[in-house]
Image: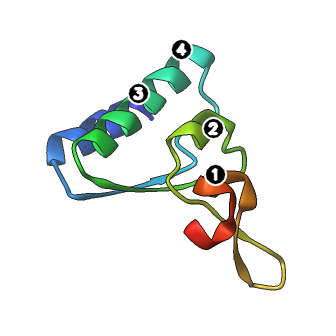
C-alpha cells in the first residue's frame, strides 16, 4: 500500500482516490499515510477516501458522508465543521 501511495504522489494528480488506505497497516505505516494525505491537502489536491474505520484520517476530513443500507447519503455530524451538518 505504501508503494502504491508513493506512486500516486509521483503522478501529481489534482484528484486522489484512496480505498481503505490504512487497512492492514501498522501504526507507523498508518502515520505515513496520514502524513501523505495531509501533504496532498496542503498542496491543494482533492482527496477522496473510503474507509470503514476513519479514525486515522478524521482530523484531516473537511467533510464526511455515511452511506446507509437504505442507499441514502447523509452528512456525518461527527465531521461537520462549525458545529452543524449544514457546513458539510
Judge from the rendering whether residue 36 lies leftward or rightward of residue 53; answer left or right.
left
Label 3 to label 1, Cα distance in Å? 17 Å
Circle 3/circle 2 CB separation < 8 Å = no
Which quadrant does the C terminus fall into? bottom right
Q: Residue at x 74, y 84 (%)?
A: 72
Q: Residue at x 73, y 53 (%)?
A: 78
Q: Earlier in the sequence, mark 3 or mark 4?
A: 4
Q: Is residue 88 visible?
A: no
- Which residue lies under the disc numbered 1? 51
Q: Horizontal and vertical percent for residue 15?
A: 28, 60
Element assignment for label 4: helix
Q: Horizontal and vertical percent for residue 82?
A: 60, 55
Label 2 to label 4, Cα distance in Å? 13 Å
Label 1 to label 4, Cα distance in Å? 18 Å
Which quadrant does the N terminus fall into? top left
- Numbered tag placed on residue 35 in the rendering: 3
Q: Earlier in the sequence, mark 2 or mark 4?
A: 2
Q: Horizontal and vertical percent for residue 53?
A: 72, 44
Q: Horizontal and vertical percent for residue 52?
A: 71, 51
Q: Residue at x 21, y 58 (%)?
A: 14
Relative to 12, say whether 2 is above or below: above
Circle 2/circle 4 CB separation < 8 Å = no
- Numbered tag placed on residue 23 in the rendering: 2
Q: Nearer the viewer, mark 2 or mark 1?
A: 1
- Which residue lies under the disc numbered 4? 28
Amino acid at each position: 500500500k505504501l508503494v502504491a501511495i508513493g506512486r500516486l504522489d509521483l503522478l501529481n494528480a489534482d484528484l486522489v482516490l484512496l480505498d481503505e488506505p490504512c487497512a492492514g497497516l501498522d501504526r507507523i505505516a498508518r502515520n505515513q499515510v496520514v502524513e501523505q494525505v495531509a501533504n496532498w491537502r496542503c498542496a491543494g489536491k482533492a482527496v477522496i477516501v473510503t474507509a470503514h474505520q476513519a479514525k486515522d484520517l478524521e482530523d484531516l476530513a473537511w467533510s464526511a458522508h455515511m452511506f446507509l443500507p437504505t442507499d441514502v447519503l447523509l452528512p456525518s455530524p461527527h465531521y461537520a465543521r462549525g458545529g452543524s451538518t449544514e457546513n458539510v
